[in-house]
Amino acid sequence: MKLIVGLGNPGNKYNFTRHNTGFLTLDFYFKLHGLDWVAKPRLGAICGRKEDIWFIKPQDFYNLSGQAVRRYMKFYKIANSDVLVVCDDFNLEFGVARYRSSGSAGGNNGLKSVISELGTDDFARIRVGTGNNELRGEMGDVDFVLSKFTSEEKKILPKILREVADKIDTWVNL
């Protein structure tokens, strides 16, 4: 059994914000594979399943995402090595997708929450670059991560999401 987690914030007002890149990535993946989401309020996430792979979008807000991850891992007895977290990273240039099999949170509060809840950083992650230094400098970090993508970024977003979906499929087949 594997667990793939997309980080983001619940609620329509956060749709298509940089911080919801994890949610957006999994939504794109689900469209590609013809999958459907269902709510699992007991475990604190919207989820879907493909064979022996669970996909979740935690509903505890970004900075508390680790709670739902821990609940799913415990309930389904999923090992750390079978967890992949997809999140945004404003320190990476927009469109760069970086996979790591483990590592630090690197300042990402969602990853910090997962690491804290699991007591380890030994799980895979794909960081999707949302960086735009000019815009970030104008807004500050908090407003930047909660901002929507620019019209130029939206044009290339499907290509980026396809690349990340391919990385997810590669990880699943490791």
Image (spheres, grey):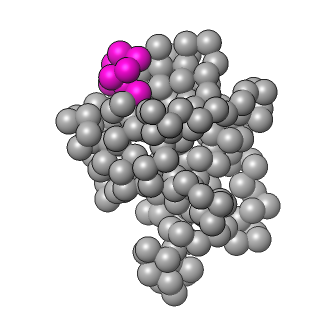
Residue 129 visible in the shown view: no
Would you say residue 111 sits in the magenta stretch?
A: no
**Is residue 74 rendered magenta in the image?**
yes
Q: Is residue 142 visible?
A: yes
Residue 70 on image: x %, y %: 33, 32
Residue 122 x, y percent position in the rendering? 28, 31
Q: Residue at x 37, y 56 (%)?
A: 63
Residue at 40 percent across and 38 percent down: it is: 68
Q: Which residues are magenta?
A: 72-81
Residue at the image position 77 percent from the left and 32 percent from the top: 32
Please tell me whether residue 62 is drawn above or below residue 131 in the rendered image: above
Dominant secondary structure, magenta: helix
Please state if 43 lies on the left or on the right of 123 as rendered.
right
Residue placed farthest to the bottom in the image? 138
Q: Nearer the viewer, residue 41 or 106?
A: 41
Residue 106 versus residue 153 in the image, above or below: above
**Measuring 55% from the left and 81% from the top, which residue is drawn there?**
134
Residue 133 percent coordinates (x, y): 51, 75
Q: Residue 171 location, x and y as percent?
A: 52, 24
| Residue lying farthest to the left in this orientation | 119
Q: How many tags in the picture?
A: 0
Front one among 40 and 166: 40
